[in-house]
Amino acid sequence: MKRYFIILLFAGGLVCLACDKDDPCEVNHVIINGECVPDYIFPDNSVVLQNGDKYYHKKFGPIIYKDGQWTDKWNNIIEEL
């Protein structure tokens, strides 16, 4: 009986490891250089943006909030948002 319990415990552990997610992000996102970058959805007024906040935009790719403006990966200011 003890042997069956050990086998069952071992099999259960393998199942738990197999079900572990490789994706650490909990929002819709894109992984860029190993970093979770959330998809861009125009933030509502309750969101306080800070310098360096990164998002992924379908048209512009990775965008970064800097000094009150959105920039692309080449530091060009994006006016269209």
Image: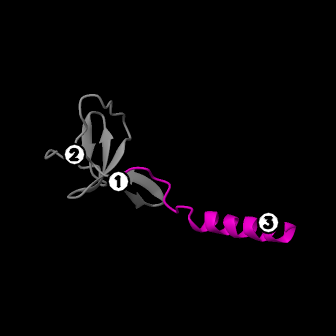
Disc 1 on helix, strand or loop?
loop
- CA gap between label 1 and label 3 equals 40 Å
Q: Is residue 16 magenta?
A: yes
- CA gap between label 2 and label 3 equals 62 Å
**Residue ID for mark 1:** 28
Instruction: Say which of 25 and 52 sits in front.
Output: 25
Give the main secondary structure, helix, strand or loop, of the magenta stretch: helix
Q: Quadrant of the C terminus?
A: top left
Which residue type does callout 2 highlight?
Answer: Ile
Q: Nearer the viewer, mark 1 or mark 3?
A: 3
Q: Quadrant of residue 69?
A: top left
Instruction: Say which of 48 and 19 sits in front.
Output: 19
At 35% from the left edge and 53% from the top edge, which residue is drawn? Answer: 28
Disc number placed over residue 67 in the picture, else none: none
Disc 2 on helix, strand or loop?
loop
Which residue type does callout 1 highlight?
Answer: Asn
Find residue 40 and report its horizontal and vertical position in percent. 27, 48
Which residue type does callout 3 highlight?
Answer: Phe
Instruction: Say which of 39 and 26 sits in front.
Output: 26
Find residue 56 and report its horizontal and vertical position in percent. 31, 53
Disc number placed over residue 77 in the picture, else none: 2
Q: Is residue 68 magenta?
A: no
At 80% from the left edge and 67% from the top edge, which residue is drawn? Answer: 6
- Span colored in magenta: 1-27
Above or below 60: residue 78: above
Q: Nearer the viewer, mark 2 or mark 3?
A: 3
Find residue 51 and report its horizontal and vertical position in percent. 36, 36
**Residue ID for mark 3:** 5
- CA gap between label 2 and label 1 equals 24 Å
At 21% from the left edge and 45% from the top edge, which residue is drawn? Answer: 77
Marks 2 & 3, CB-CB < 8 Å contact: no
Find residue 15 and report its horizontal and vertical position in percent. 62, 68
